[in-house]
Image (tube, grey):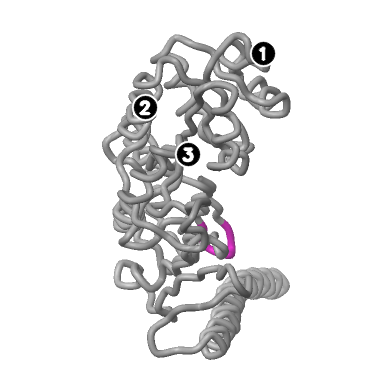
């Protein structure tokens, strides 16, 4: 997290964060944040709103990591591919390596990143040293796994906080529930595990209750289901501000366009509403900043005038005496 103070006020930027209150690191982070604020209130909170919706609920990373380890342990004769991004999920990979006492294969660019992070003895680019491989997430598909299984028994694991899983099979273009997705995926060698480094809705809510910002702005605008945190947490914020009901954006297979599904509104009206809100919020921020600057200028001018009056009176008294 990043905390900024100045004439613009007090601003907190969370970045990608996971607020697990039960973990020791989270308790330490909470104490550090409270000490850093030193009683000041947060004017603007820039929040990781990736999963800012009550439908997003998943276990702690420790629980999810144990699920991954158990899946791998149940397949002792299988190669294992784990889908990850170019950054992140390092803790998960370290837990797997420690629990199974094995190295983990990563691609060369990712290995350089691991070395920069200080992990020198856990990861390798030699496939002969391990059966567990961490690969780019977009490479973990049912088609790829089916091809790998023609060479050697292989399973895939997709750690993600999304409660839905896109099935690239006969039902292409449809979304199945988590349970149905897992049942079908297991037959097709692919497992989905709810491991995420972004906070779920309940964790975000707990965090908002602690910091109580005057206003909150989401930093993710192109997530699976975009949600404006102001819609859910405006009652927990110190100031009243505009908000609009969240809407899910689903990419259709036929047209490839983005459709905004929102009760009682059309895509055109939704876009117009968002544009109006952005303009109003922009002017609101400018007016707040302008008023704050004006107050500071007046204070400074007042000090200079007072000093000038005192100096003038002193000179006048000196001349009389």
Range shown magenta:
6-11
Rendered location of residue 54, percent (x, y): 31, 61
Residue 255, percent from left and from top: 63, 75
Q: Which SS does the magenta portion mostly show?
A: strand
Residue that badge 2 annotates = 71
Mark before the other along the chain sequence, 3 or 2: 2
Lower sequence index among marks 1 and 2: 2
Q: Which residue is mark 3?
A: 158
- The mark that comes first in sequence, 3 or 1, is 1
Mark 1 vs 2: CB contact within 8 A: no
Position of 69 with respect to 89 (left or right) is left
Task: Evaluate if marks 3 and 1 touch, with contact meaning CB atoms under 8 Å apart.
Answer: no
Label 3 with label 2: CB-CB less than 8 Å: no
Crowd tier of the residue under label 2, counting other residues whose Cα lies within 10 Å: few below 14, some 14–19, many 20 or above: some
Q: Is residue 7 at least partly visible in the picture?
A: yes
What residue is disc 1 on?
A: 126
Q: CA distance from mark 1 to mark 2?
A: 23 Å
Q: CA distance from mark 3 to mark 1?
A: 22 Å
Residue at the location (51% across, 47% down)?
16
């Amino acid at each position: 997290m990043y905390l900024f103070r100045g004439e613009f006020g007090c601003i907190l930027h969370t970045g990608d964060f996971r607020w697990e209150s039960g973990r020791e690191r989270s308790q330490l982070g909470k104490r550090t944040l409270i000490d850093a604020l030193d009683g000041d209130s947060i004017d603007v909170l820039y929040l990781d709103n990736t999963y800012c919706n009550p439908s997003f609920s998943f276990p702690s990373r420790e629980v999810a990591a144990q699920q991954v380890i158990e899946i791998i342990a149940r397949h002792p004769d299988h190669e294992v591919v784990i889908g990850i991004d170019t950054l992140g999920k390092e803790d998960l990979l370290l837990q797997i390596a420690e629990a199974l006492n094995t190295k983990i294969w990563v691609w060369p660019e990712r290995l350089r990143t691991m070395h920069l992070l200080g992990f020198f003895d856990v990861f390798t680019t030699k496939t002969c040293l391990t059966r567990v491989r961490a690969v780019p997430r977009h490479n973990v598909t049912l088609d790829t796994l089916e091809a790998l299984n023609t060479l050697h028994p292989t399973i895939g694991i997709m750690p993600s906080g999304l409660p839905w899983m896109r099935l690239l099979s006969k039902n292409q273009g449809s979304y199945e529930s988590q349970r149905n997705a897992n049942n079908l995926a297991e037959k097709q060698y692919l497992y989905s595990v709810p491991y995420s480094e972004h906070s779920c809705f309940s964790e975000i809510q707990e965090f908002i209750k602690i910091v109580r910002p005057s206003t909150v702005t989401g930093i993710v605008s192109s997530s699976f289901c975009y949600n404006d945190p102001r819609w859910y947490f405006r009652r927990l914020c110190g100031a009243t501000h505009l908000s609009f009901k969240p809407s899910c954006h689903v990419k259709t297979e036929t047209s490839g366009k983005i459709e905004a599904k929102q009760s009682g509104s059309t895509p055109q009206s939704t876009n117009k509403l968002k544009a109006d809100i952005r303009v109003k919020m922009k002017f609101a921020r400018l007016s707040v900043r302008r008023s704050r600057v004006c107050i500071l200028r007046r204070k400074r001018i007042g000090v200079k005038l007072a000093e000038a009056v005192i100096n003038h009176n002193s000179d006048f008294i000196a001349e009389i005496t």
